[in-house]
């Protein structure tokens, strides 16, 4: 009986361990490090493809506004617009720093599909998109009216449902009027949207009393001036 217990103990002692060996752990660590290094070293900025409403650099800079359109000639290609660093943008003369930050932020938005009005248009010609009203009959007495983007010069009844695109932010009011950002009525149930400077611009807030950093100083000086004016009005100099 005693010999059986000794044999069992020896069996447990010399049984192959389930824990990975040092060599295996080393190889795994090397492999993970190699993959991480490869992923980091290949981190070239993603260059998104142009979209119908934004086919080139000038249109992109026109849409985001803040006077960036004047710098369009400094970007020879679409790729350069999305790959130049902040330091390189500064060397190109894009000033001040907040303008560079704004451009970089909009680059990221575009890169991840965060567009402004018209970003989901499919049919655009020379910076202009046609919008028309599609009537969908829900019942003999009820019709659902939707705004769709159609190829230039085409009418709704000339297209199949698959050829129409329903853009976000546009709807029909008073049966006929197409309403939405920068929609210009051109006829009955027909409107156009044209590329306009600042369409996608993030408007800056208006500074009150010098903004957050100078507000206390400006208000203190105002109070001093008001007290001085009051003393002078009362005859105290």
Image: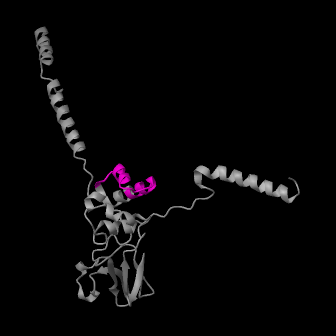
Location of residue 170 by image quarter: bottom left
Q: Residue furthest right?
A: 235
In percent of width and height, residue 158 lies at 24, 88
Majority secondary structure in the magenta region: helix
Q: Residue at x 18, y 32 (%)?
A: 30
Residue 112 visible here = no
In magenta segment, residue 40: no
Q: Residue at x 38, y 52 (%)?
A: 90
Question: Camera-side residue: 138 or 165?
Answer: 165
Relative to 53, 196 lies left or right: right
Residue 120: name its quadrant.
Answer: bottom left
Number of numbered discs visible in the structure rendering: 0
Tell me: residue 204, above or below residue 7.
below
Q: Which residue is found at the position 12% from the left and 20% from the top?
A: 15
Q: Up-down: is 183 above or below 218?
A: below
Q: Residue at x 17, y 35 (%)?
A: 31
Residue 183 picture quarter = bottom left
Between residues 113 and 205, which one lies in front from this camera angle?
205
Question: Left or right: 129 with respect to 36?
Answer: right
Residue 88 among magenta residues: yes
Q: Is residue 21 left or right of residue 135?
A: left
Magenta highlight range: 83-103
In the drawing, does residue 149 fall left or right of residue 21?
A: right
Observer-nearest of 221 and 54: 221
Give the image location of residue 116, x and y in percent.
38, 67
Render colour scheme = one colour
Is residue 45 visible in the rendered image? The answer is yes
Vertical order, 63 against 183 (above or below): above
């Amino acid at each position: 009986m005693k010999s059986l217990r000794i044999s069992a103990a020896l069996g447990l002692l010399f049984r192959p361990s389930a824990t990975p060996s040092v060599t295996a752990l080393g190889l795994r660590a090397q492999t993970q490090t190699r993959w991480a290094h490869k992923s980091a070293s290949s981190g070239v900025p993603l260059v998104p493809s142009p979209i119908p409403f934004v086919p080139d650099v000038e249109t992109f800079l026109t849409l985001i506004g803040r006077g960036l359109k004047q710098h369009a000639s400094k970007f020879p290609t679409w790729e350069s617009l999305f790959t130049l660093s902040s330091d390189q943008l500064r060397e190109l003369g894009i000033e001040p720093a907040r303008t560079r930050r704004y451009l970089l932020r909009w680059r990221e938005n575009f890169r991840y599909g965060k567009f402004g009005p018209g970003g989901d248009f499919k049919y655009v010609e020379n910076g202009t998109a046609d919008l028309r009203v599609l009537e969908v009959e829900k019942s003999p007495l009820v019709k659902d009216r939707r705004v769709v983007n159609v190829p230039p010069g085409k009418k709704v009844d000339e297209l199949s449902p698959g050829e129409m695109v329903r853009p976000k932010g546009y709807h029909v009011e008073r049966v006929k009027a197409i309403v939405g950002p920068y929609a210009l009525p051109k006829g009955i149930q027909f409107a156009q949207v044209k590329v306009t400077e600042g369409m996608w611009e993030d408007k800056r807030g208006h500074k009150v009393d010098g903004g957050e950093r100078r507000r206390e100083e400006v208000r203190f000086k105002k109070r001093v001036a008001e007290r001085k004016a009051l003393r002078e009005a009362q005859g105290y100099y």
